[in-house]
Amino acid sequence: MRSHPGLALAYFACVIGITMVVASPVFAGISLAGAALAALAARGRAALPGLGASVVLVVFVTAVNPLFNTAGSTVLLQVFGRPYTAEALLFGAVLAAQLAASLLWFSAAGRALTPEKATYLFGGAAPALSAVLTLVVRLVPAYGRRARAAAEARDAMGCGPASAHGMVGKARAGATVLAALTAWSLEQGVTTADSLAARGFGTGRRTVWGRYRLTVRAGLAMAALVALLALVGVGLAAGAGGAQFLPQFALPAASPLVAAAWAAWAALVIAPTLVGAGEEALWRCSLSTR
């Protein structure tokens, strides 16, 4: 999204916070669906492996939870002499949906809040935090590239993990790649520290440059965000986020206020998909008029 970094940060903080705190089947299901749609809209087919892993996570947590939590009055079967209840199964599904949705939203936030935007947001107030966040974001992809390069080089020499025999040989080959990565990371850390010191990092207050401006569009988006959050908050206070799991499962009564809160939450989580679709449509229209 080509939005202001502050708006993106506020949006993802609110969505992730509500997703993690409100243990409601309706809120968790809507959040998971919105996060999946946002991933598909942003990455297309590249998002399918991550979504598949989310489905596996949801199924695993849902199925395993009744093995540890035997509370509930509706016994489906006996597993090792312990009751496997429908209420524990539903509660595990809600927890799994919250976990999967939170992971997907964190991934979306990582794509939207690029290192440039993080530096713009925190560079003036907390330059050390901004530098650490930027380095951490860059570290994982760089580690992956270096690991693949080292493994391919050793495979070409005939001493890589693919050419090793037995578990001990494969472990030694992997340890050699890990040692190379460790040495590279230490060397890169020293180089980065020297580079920051040469640029005067930490000697005084930094000046922050950014090409982001608070436009009318950003103001309208912030107003819409506040209005939807207010409606969701009022609905949560009225019990829209509640759910009874014990002794039997039951959802809150669908009053007009509860239904409005659910609708506002759905509109909130689908906002990135709608904004991305609108920007894509405008871009295609601009190309067609050239």
Image (tube, rainbow, N blue to C red):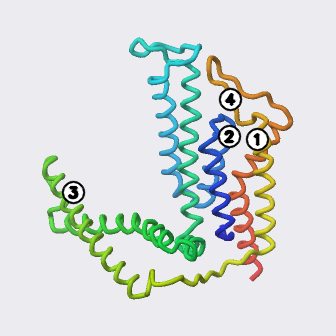
Q: Is residue 5 above or below residue 35?
A: below
Cβ–Cβ under 8 Å for marks 2 and 4: no
Residue found at x 39% / y 67%: 139
Quickly name the residue at label 1.
Answer: 262
Mark closer to the chain start, 1 or 4? 4
Relative to 76, is 288 on the left or the right?
right
Type of the residue with mark 1 = Trp
Work out how far the residue at label 1 is from the one at label 3, CA to CA, in angstroms: 50 Å
Residue 36: x and y, percent? 60, 49
Secondary structure under tag 1 reads helix
Question: Quarter of the image holding residue 94?
Answer: top right
Quickly name the residue at label 4.
Answer: 243
Type of the residue with mark 2 = Phe
Mark closer to the chain start, 2 or 1? 2
Which mark is nearer the camera, 1 or 4?
4
Cβ–Cβ under 8 Å for marks 2 and 1: yes
Mark closer to the chain start, 4 or 3? 3
